[in-house]
Amino acid sequence: MTHSLKPWNTFGIDHCAKHIVCAENEQQLLSAWQQATREGLPVMILGEGSNVLFLENYAGTVILNRLKGIEVKETAEAWHLYVGAGENWHQLVRYALDNNMPGLENLALIPGCVGSSPIQNIGAYGVELQRVCDYVDCIELETGKRLRLSAAECRFGYRDSIFKHEYQDRVAIVAVGLRLSKQWQPILTYGDLTCLDPKTVTAQQVFDAVCHMRTTKLPDPKVHGNAGSFF
């Protein structure tokens, strides 16, 4: 028996996987990975499928990372967010704005989940994840050992990180720590954002402008399959 991957990738490609497992906590994720490994099956840990293109059926187990939760700690200088890897990225941006925590608005409408953001060091309109990332929590798949990598240890580059190299297929990201400074300064160096007045603009206005630019350039992946950007 196989299971359709169409709901689990933003291109809407209707190929199948042998098994699909939804992991809502670390133990479920580890158990699914270990079970597939014991059976000699290939394993793919998938977020929201916005950075994958299935060209054929997948003869293994696809684990959907659905580790949720957002915790906020406030200091005099910043808001510190601890975000589960399975949270939707754009919804996190909205959550931060709705709770008066600016700093993510340039990254609005990037498809995918929070756990994939450090892998790619997502970026748009003058801001990259590394600007706000404090640390990344992950687990070693073979041992179950928990690791916390500082932003420096993640070795962020242009759409690059350690998770595409030494840690590829070795760890699963379970949470991301973000630091949003209370000394907010708008980043208006790209596209239509340059028309905004840095002295009066609000984070909500930046968010609205970014959403407008993205929706005019790319269709909604729920209507027409896409991955958010092509290079």
Image (cartoon, rainbow, N blue to C red):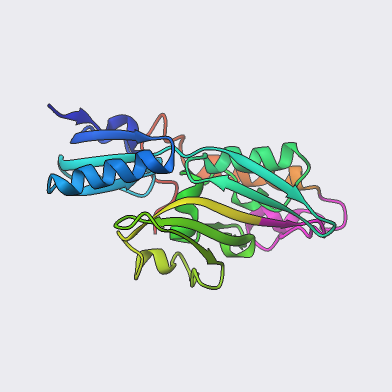
Residue 186 relative to residue 149: left or right: right
Residue under the point 52% across and 59% down: 136
Q: Residue furthest top?
A: 1
Residue 196 relative to residue 11: left or right: right
Q: Is residue 212 visible?
A: no
Percent position of residue 66, x then y? 44, 37
Q: Residue furthest right?
A: 199
Q: Quadrant of the N terminus?
A: top left
Seen in the picture, residue 13 relative to 143 is either above or below; the reply is: above
Say whether residue 28 is magenta.
Answer: no
Nearest the eye: 9 or 164? 164
Percent position of residue 98, x then y? 73, 36
Q: Which residues are magenta?
A: 179-201
Q: Main secondary structure of the magenta part?
A: loop
Q: Quadrant of the C terminus?
A: bottom left
Percent position of residue 209, x then y? 67, 45
Residue under the point 64% across and 52% down: 106
Say whether residue 188 is magenta.
Answer: yes
Residue 72 relative to residue 65: left or right: right
Residue 74 relative to residue 42: left or right: right
Percent position of residue 17, x then y? 19, 36
Residue under the point 56% across and 67% down: 150
Nearest the eye: 125 or 53? 53
Residue under the point 85% across and 57% down: 76
